[in-house]
């Protein structure tokens, strides 16, 4: 499974940014038809708005991806200590190309299911478009919680099933088989129950088949 995921993101590294940001007419049609027109650019803005521009704590970005959505925000958080972690070396290399010149940002290749950090290391853990790809989701929830400080914020967005038949079909029959997504997937209600086991003050929202939220530990 790990090789399948690595190969999937390696093969898509040259089109990933275009699809996610709807940079071409083809990616716009793909989003409109299969994702009910959900705009990842707008969701990224909402997610990142949970983090103030005067944030000066420690932040884990997992998976960092190519930093296509976070680049401009991370550049400005000069007082913060940001760790960008990704399982894919190809994704991480693109993030480094964008942000490698900034001293307040470090890069780690690693597994979200076995994070190489001590307990309660970070004030914020951000996970954009990650949990639908993680093969061991229980470990991912447990590990992101473990490395988050008490009172810290867990902020995330990812695919949930049960909102759109065509999106669910795409995920099951194409994206999962190619290795970009990894089952099992949760419904909104199932996710809420999971988050309640770990967090308080849960602010959760949906846009089509994408859920985004901010929780406090």
Image (cartoon, rainbow, N blue to C red):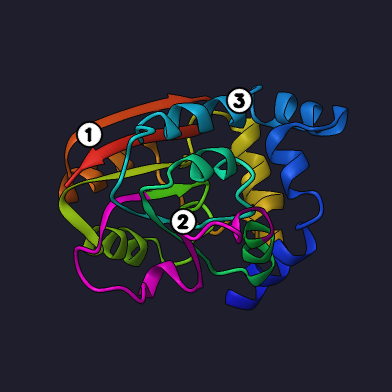
Q: In the rendered structure, which segment of residues is drawn in magenta? A: 97-125
Seen at 53% across and 46% down, the residue is 129
Q: Is residue 15 left or right of residue 111?
A: right
**Residue 92 image position (x, y, % from top left):** 62, 64
Label ID, residue 202: 1
Along the line of sight, the residue nearer the viewer: 42 or 185: 42
Q: Marks 2 and 1, Cα distance to the nearest angstrom?
A: 22 Å
Seen at 55% across and 59% down, the residue is 182
Residue furthest right as drawn = 25
Seen at 62% across and 49% down, the residue is 172
Q: Disc 3 on helix, strand or loop?
A: loop
Q: Marks 1 and 3: in contact by CB < 8 Å?
A: no
**Residue 98 image position (x, y, % from top left):** 66, 53
Seen at 69% across and 59% down, the residue is 97
| Mark 3, residue position | 38
Label ID, residue 144: none
Label ID, residue 184: 2
């Amino acid at each position: 499974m790990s090789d399948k995921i690595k190969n999937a993101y390696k093969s898509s590294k040259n089109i990933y940014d275009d699809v996610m940001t709807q940079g071409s007419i083809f990616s716009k049609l793909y989003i409109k038809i299969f994702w009910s027109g959900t705009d990842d650019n707008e969701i990224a803005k909402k997610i990142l708005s949970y983090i103030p521009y005067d944030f000066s704590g420690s932040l884990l970005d997992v998976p960092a991806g190519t930093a296509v959505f976070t680049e401009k925000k991370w550049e400005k958080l000069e007082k913060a200590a940001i760790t960008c972690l990704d399982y894919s070396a190809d994704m991480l290399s693109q993030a480094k190309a964008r942000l490698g010149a900034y001293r307040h940002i470090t890069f780690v290749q690693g597994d979200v299911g076995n994070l190489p950090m001590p307990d309660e290391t970070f004030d914020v853990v951000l996970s954009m478009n990650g949990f639908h790809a993680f093969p061991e989701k229980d470990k991912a929830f447990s590990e992101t919680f473990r490395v988050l400080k008490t009172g810290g914020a867990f902020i995330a967005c990812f695919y949930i099933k049960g909102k759109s038949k065509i999106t669910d079909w795409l995920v099951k029959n194409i994206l999962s088989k190619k290795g970009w997504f990894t089952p099992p997937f949760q419904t909104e209600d199932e996710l809420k129950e999971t988050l309640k086991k770990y967090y308080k003050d849960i602010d959760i929202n949906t846009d089509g088949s994408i859920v985004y939220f901010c929780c406090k530990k």
